Amino acid sequence: MLRKKILSILILFLFVFSGCKAKGYQKYSQTRLAMGTTLTVTFFTEDKKKAKAIFDEIFLLANQLEQLFSSRNPHGTIKKINQQSQYTLSDPLLLTTIKQALKIAQLTEGAFDPSLYHLISLWDIENQMQKKDPKIPLPSAIEKVLLKTGYQNLLIKNNQLFLNNQAALDLGAIAKGKIVDQLAKYLDKEAISDYFINGGGDIAVKGLFGGFRKWKIAITNPYRNQEFLGVVNISNVAIVTSGNYERFFISNNQRFHHILDPKTGYPANTGIDSVTVIANDATTADAMATALFVMGEKKGLAFTENYPHLEVIFFQKKQGIITMSHSSGIQASKQQNGQWSFRLKE
Ligand code: FAD
Ligand code: MG
C-alpha cells in the first residue's frame, strides 16, 4: 500500500515537473561565436535527431544574417551602402530593419540613431580598448564628424535609401536584436515551443523552461562582471541589456564606452551603468536599450511609461551605492541573497 502511495506521488511529481511533456523531452543547448560575441541557443524537444539538425541550420542562418548586417564586413552590403548617397535596398529584411531603426530614432528623438557610422569609426572603441595608450578624439574632429550624422539624413522612398550630407549607416545597436528575432522565427517554424536565444545579451524566450517554469534571465553586475544583480522571470518576450562595462577604455581616470550620445558625440554620461529592456521583440528591445541608456533614468522612465509593452530596469551608483529603478509594469523584490527578483506584472 505504502509502496503504491510512494509510486503514485512519484508519478505525480514527474508529471508536474515534466510539465505534462512527452517522455524524453529534454534540454539541448549550444554556444558558438557570432557577431563578435557568443550566441547561445537552448531549447527543449523529445527528438534528438531534430535537435542536431536545428543546431546546424540555426548557426548557419546566424552567420548569413551576420554577413548581411555587419558594418565590418569589407564586402558586405552595409559597406556598399555607405559608399553611396543612394542605394536600392533589394533585401527585404534589411529594408524593414532600416525602416524600424528610423522609426525608433524618431520616437526617441535621436537618442538611438542608426546614422552614426562616422562617429563610431572616429572613436573606434573596440580597437582603442586593445591599446596601452588609447586615444580620445579631438573635440574639433568630433564636431566635424557630427556634421555627417543625424537620422534625418537617412530617407527611405519605396526601396530607395538616400544618405544625405555624407551620413552613413551603423546598425550595431539594433541588428543583434533583429538576428535574434529571425532565429526565434526559425525555431517557431520548426514547432519548438520552449526556447531561449542569447546573442551577447540580446535574448528572446518562448514558452517555459522544460515546459514547467518561466525562464530565469540573470542581469550582470556592471561593477563585478562575474556576478549578477538580479534575475528576471519571463516568458514569450525579449530582454536586452546594454551597459558601459564591456566595451570601453580608461583614459585620465575616465571611462569611454561604446554607447554614444548622438547630440554631444561623446559616450553617454547620465550616470546609468546598465539598462535592461523587456519588449515583445528583440529588435525593439535592442534599439530601446541603447536609447534609454542615452536618455538616462528620469527621461527614460517617463518615456517608457508611454509604451505598454516596453519595460526597463536601470542600475547606477548613487553616492557609491548600487541603485536600481524600474518602470511601472515590473514587479521587483529583494531576495535573501541580496539579489533582485523581477517579473512582469500580470
Ligand atoms: P548596444 O547599445 O546595443 O549597441 C552599441 C553599438 O551601437 C555601438 O558599438 C555602436 O556601434 C552603436 N551605437 C553607439 N551609440 C549609438 C546610438 N546612440 N544609437 C545607435 N547606435 C549606437 N564586434 C566585434 O568585436 N567583432 C565582430 O566581428 C562583430 N561583428 C558584428 C556583427 C553584427 C552583425 C553585429 C550586429 C555586431 C557585431 N559586433 C562585432 C559588435 C558587437 O557585438 C557589439 O558590441 C554590439 O553590436 C553592440 O551591442 P551591445 O548590446 O553591446 O550595445
Ligand atoms: Mg542596443
Image (spheres, rainbow, N blue to C red):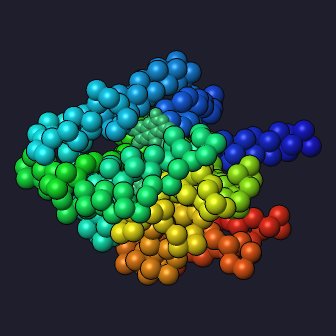
Q: Residue at x 31, y 56 (%)?
A: 145
Q: How far across and down, in percent of the image, does residue 202 sit?
A: 49, 49
Q: Residue at x 32, y 49 (%)?
A: 117
Q: In which quarter of the image is residue 294?
A: bottom left
Q: How far across and down, in percent of the image, does residue 331 sit?
A: 60, 73
321 or 166: nearer the viewer:
166
Res 103 seen here: yes
Compared across the picture, whether 18 is left or right of 134 comes to: right
75 or 27: nearer the viewer:
75
345 or 101: nearer the viewer:
101
Compared across the picture, whether 305 is left or right of 103 comes to: right
Res 101 seen here: no
| Quadrant where the N terminus is found in the figure | top right
Q: How far across and down, in percent of the image, does residue 239 sit?
A: 51, 56
Tell me: residue 335, above or below residue 5: below
Compared across the picture, whether 246 is left or right of 299 comes to: right
Q: Residue at x 74, y 75 (%)?
A: 321
Compared across the picture, whether 185 is left or right of 259 comes to: left
